Amino acid sequence: MDLAFYPGCSLSQSAQLYNHQTGLIFDKLGIQLQEITDWNCCGATSVSKINDFMAVALSARNLGIAEASGVDELVVPCSACYSRTLVAQQRMRDNAELVAHINEGLGKKVQGNIKVSSILEILQRVVCVEGFEAPHADTLNGLVPVCYYGCMFTRFPYPVQIPEDVENPRGMEKVLEAIGLTARDWNYKVRCCGASASVYDQGMALKLMAKIMKDAIGWGANCIVVTCPMCQMNLDAHQNQLCRKYGIEERLPIYFITELLGVAMGIGSKELLLDRHFIKGRLGKESGKEALTR
């Protein structure tokens, strides 16, 4: 299977770990990722607050490049990039005048014929099937995860169709079930962590993250699993600060789903770069094997 791949700015910078792991996982699953050439920033949440047209045009350029590659599907791991790309595509489908205007300035025109997918859509398609093997799934014994989707994955500024229940998404839970993990149900899986507010209104962001942490701990979780690089960075990098401020004694590792899937599939901890976190998980020993635990 060949897929076009859009890493976006986060996976190229602060979430290089996620980018690296995604490449490893997909390669092991037999999926060839073709990073689109000369891609640009999707604008994330910032551009739409300043220039509505540019918020569509930035992602449109990436879509045109992806379509020109001849691949039928584009996978976008970052939740913010996924949202912007999906919204831009739908807005152009709904407005022929808009797409014509945008295409005037593009070297590679948008045709609207490529499927935009999240990383969870692809993983469910190849992992949550009969015959999938996770030979080292037992090394995850002891993990009690909660799945945190955040707001960008489920709250879109324009009506789009996604294969998830936006109030109670289950894609991550299904992937974890395929490797023998049962995620705890909880109340904050689609709440906002503050996202970029951690830069300009840190007090508010820390308050939001503290609520997420308290609920996860209250449900007995010992780790949080994510797909969004912004959510992972916020909850990982600011966790000690928010826990001290709000009197939270527990610390929870914030894992990308690629980490747990990679361990279950037998990819080594060094190759997965599991030590690249502020809040460390630890490698313990269970049944003579390395185990990923708190």
Image: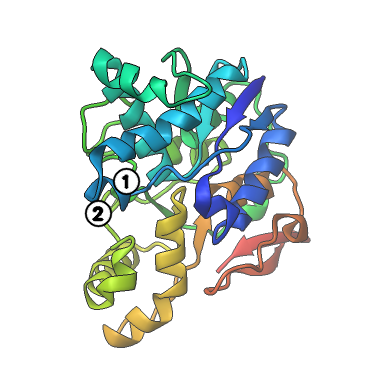
Image height of 229 relative to 24, above or below: below
Front-lying residue, 157 or 57 = 57
Circle 1 crowding by C-alpha within 10 Å: few under 14, some 14–19, many from 20: many
- Residue 51 can be seen, yes or no: yes
Q: Is residue 68 left or right of residue 91?
A: right
Query: In the image, what residue occupies the spot 48% across and 17% down?
Result: 114
Q: Is residue 110 left or right of residue 140?
A: left
Circle 2 crowding by C-alpha within 10 Å: few under 14, some 14–19, many from 20: some
The residue that label 2 is drawn on is 191
Marks 1 and 2 close (CB-CB < 8 Å): no
- Tell me, for residue 152, which label it has, or none: 1
Q: Tell me which corner region of the image, top left, top right, bottom left or bottom right, holds residue 234.
A: bottom left
Q: Is residue 45 left or right of residue 252?
A: left
Image height of 154 relative to 74, above or below: below
**Residue 64 location (% of width, % of height):** 49, 23
Q: CA distance from mark 1 to mark 2?
A: 9 Å
Q: Is residue 119 left or right of residue 32?
A: left
Query: In the image, what residue occupies the spot 40% across and 21% down?
Result: 104
- Mark nearer the N terminus (1 vs 2): 1
Q: Amino acid at mark 2?
A: Arg
